[in-house]
Image (spheres, rainbow, N blue to C red):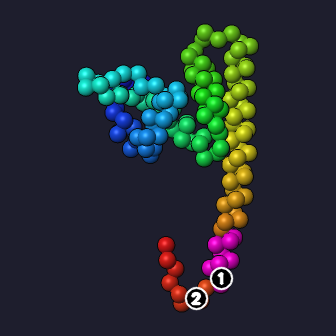
Amino acid sequence: MDGKHMQIGEVAARTELSLRTIRHYEETGLVVPPARSQGGFRLYTETDVARLMVIRRMKPLGFTLDQMRDLLDATDRLDAGGTLDPDEHEVLLQRVREYEQSAAEQVEKLRVQLARAEDFAATLRARLPEHEPVRP
């Protein structure tokens, strides 16, 4: 992208992931920092941040590390450009479509769970005296 390199602390702040989590994703091969500083520190790019954000968004939807790896592989290959034949391109697009469909299904399940949780909280709130202060 722009060639700017960041150390892991900045990446952690931008992605809201812990250092430990970022290192775990490195160990599993989901993200590989392309460079190191003269002092040996890992250096990351905007592309690495984007990958970590994809992973961060997939995690609460229940995707496994293997599924994350598979989707990232598909999107990496699609982003690589014109080296794909039309059949391979369509296969990769179909993989992305399947992940999108799975994500949409998980989002709907989470909406149902959230609605139930909100109903439960409202039920409890209704049982409390009106003059009692609500605590966060």
Q: Residue at x 64, y 45 (%)?
A: 61
Badge 2 crowding class, 10 Å Cα cut-off, few under 14, some 14 to 19, many 20 or more, is: few
Query: How far apart, in angstroms, are the residues tagged by discs 1 and 2?
Result: 8 Å
The residue labelled by disc 2 is 130
Query: Which residue type does callout 2 highlight?
Result: Glu
Q: Quadrant of residue 96?
A: top right
Percent across and percent down for residue 33 are 42, 25
Q: Residue at x 65, y 84 (%)?
A: 127
Percent across and percent down for residue 90 are 72, 19
Query: Which residue type does callout 1 highlight?
Result: Ala
Q: Which residue occupies the foreground of this view, 9 or 112?
A: 9
Q: Residue at x 65, y 82 (%)?
A: 126
Outermost left residue: 39
Whether residue 50 is visible, yes or no, is: no
Q: Is residue 125 magenta?
A: yes
Q: Quadrant of residue 94?
A: top right
* Disc 2, SS: loop
Magenta-drawn segment:
119-127
Q: Is residue 83 magenta?
A: no
Badge 1 crowding class, 10 Å Cα cut-off, few under 14, some 14 to 19, many 20 or more, is: few
Q: Is residue 117 above or below residue 37?
A: below
Q: Residue at x 38, y 25 (%)?
A: 2
5 relative position to 49: left or right: left
Percent across and percent down for residue 10 are 35, 39
Image quadrant in which the N terminus is located: top left
131 relative position to 40: left or right: right
Give the label on residue 126, or none: 1
* Disc 1, SS: helix
Q: Is residue 62 above or below residue 24?
A: below
